[in-house]
Image (spheres, rainbow, N blue to C red):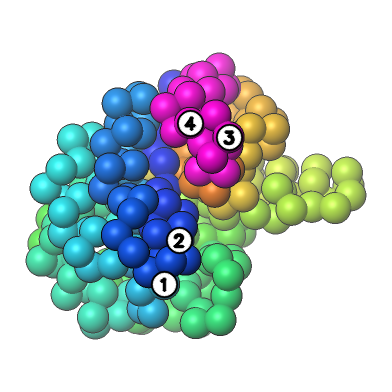
Amino acid sequence: MAGLAVNVDHIATLREARKINYPDPVTAAALVELAGAEGVVVHLREDRRHIKDRDVKILRQTVKTKLILEMAATPEMLGIALEVKPDLVTLVPEKRKELTTEGGLNLSLNMDIISEGVETLKSAHIPVSLFVDPDAEQIRIAHKINADMVEIHTGGFCDADTPQKRTKAFLNIVNAAKLAKKLKLGVNAGHGLCYNTIKAFKGIQEIDEYSIGHSIISRAVLVGLDKAVREMLALVKEL
C-alpha cells in the first residue's frame, strides 16, 4: 500500500506573502502528521523564497514520521543536509526564475555532480532520492550512481492537454516505475498530482509513496488542513 508525504512549502509561501511569522509550516507539519500523512516534505531553495533554514531546523526536531528535504546538489545545501540529517534527501534541479520545479534532473549531463552529492549524503547515512523524469536512461543512471530511490516526475501527465499526451505520459511513468523496481530502487512519485489525477494510479503497485503539496494546501484553504490531508490519504490508500 502506497504512502503519502505532504509538501508544506506553500504554507511558507503564504507566510512570505506578507513577510510575517504566520502561518507556520512547522505547525502545518504537525497537523498533516496528525491527519495520517507518512512524511513531511520541504524544499529549501537557494533563494529561500518560502521555506527558511529556521523551518528545516525546527522540523528536524518536531517531525515524528519522516522529514524529506528537497534541495539542489550544491555545496551549501549538502552542508545543511549533513547538519540537519533529514530522513531522506531528494535532489532536485533548481532554476532561480521558475515558479516551481519544472522537470527532473538531467543525470546524463550532471552525473558527476549528482554522483558526488549522493556519495556525500550516503557517507553520512542519509538516504538519497533523485527527482527524475520518467525516462529509462535517467532511471538507469540513478541506479548506477547508487541512489536509494527515485521520485518520478508526474507533471507531464498531470499537465497534458490532450488525451493522447496524457496516455503517453502515464505509460512513461508506469514503465519508469517498473524499471526502477527491477533495479531495486525505491519509487516515489510527485509533481502536479491532485484529487483527480491521483485516481489514475490505481493498481500501480511499483510506486511506494506519493509526494503531494499544492493541491492539498489549496484545498485546505477551503476545507481545513486536516480534512484535506485525510481526503487525499483516503484516495492514496485506495490505489
Whether pointer 3 and pointer 2 mark residues with C-beta atoms closer than 8 Å, the reply is no
**Residue 49, numbered label:** 1
How far is disc 4 from disc 3 in space, using C-alphas? Answer: 6 Å
Q: Magenta residues: mostly which secondary structure?
A: helix
Helix, strand or loop for disc 2: helix
**Residue 224, numbered label:** 4
The stretch of residues the image draws in magenta is: 217-239
**Residue 13, numbered label:** 2
Would you call the spot at circle 1 few (<14 residues within 10 Å), some (14-19), or many (20 or more)? some
How far is disc 4 from disc 1 in space, using C-alphas? Answer: 24 Å
Task: Please name the residue that numbered disc 3 is placed on.
Answer: 222
Rendered position, 98 above or below 138: below
Residue 37 in the image: x percent, y percent? 36, 30
Would you call the spot at circle 4 few (<14 residues within 10 Å), some (14-19), or many (20 or more)? few
Residue type, numbered disc 2: Thr
Residue type, numbered disc 4: Gly
Would you call the spot at circle 2 few (<14 residues within 10 Å), some (14-19), or many (20 or more)? some
Q: Quadrant of residue 114?
A: bottom left
Whether pointer 2 and pointer 1 mark residues with C-beta atoms closer than 8 Å, the reply is yes
Whether pointer 4 and pointer 3 mark residues with C-beta atoms closer than 8 Å, the reply is no
* Upstream in sequence: badge 4 or badge 2: 2
How far is disc 4 from disc 2 in space, using C-alphas? Answer: 17 Å
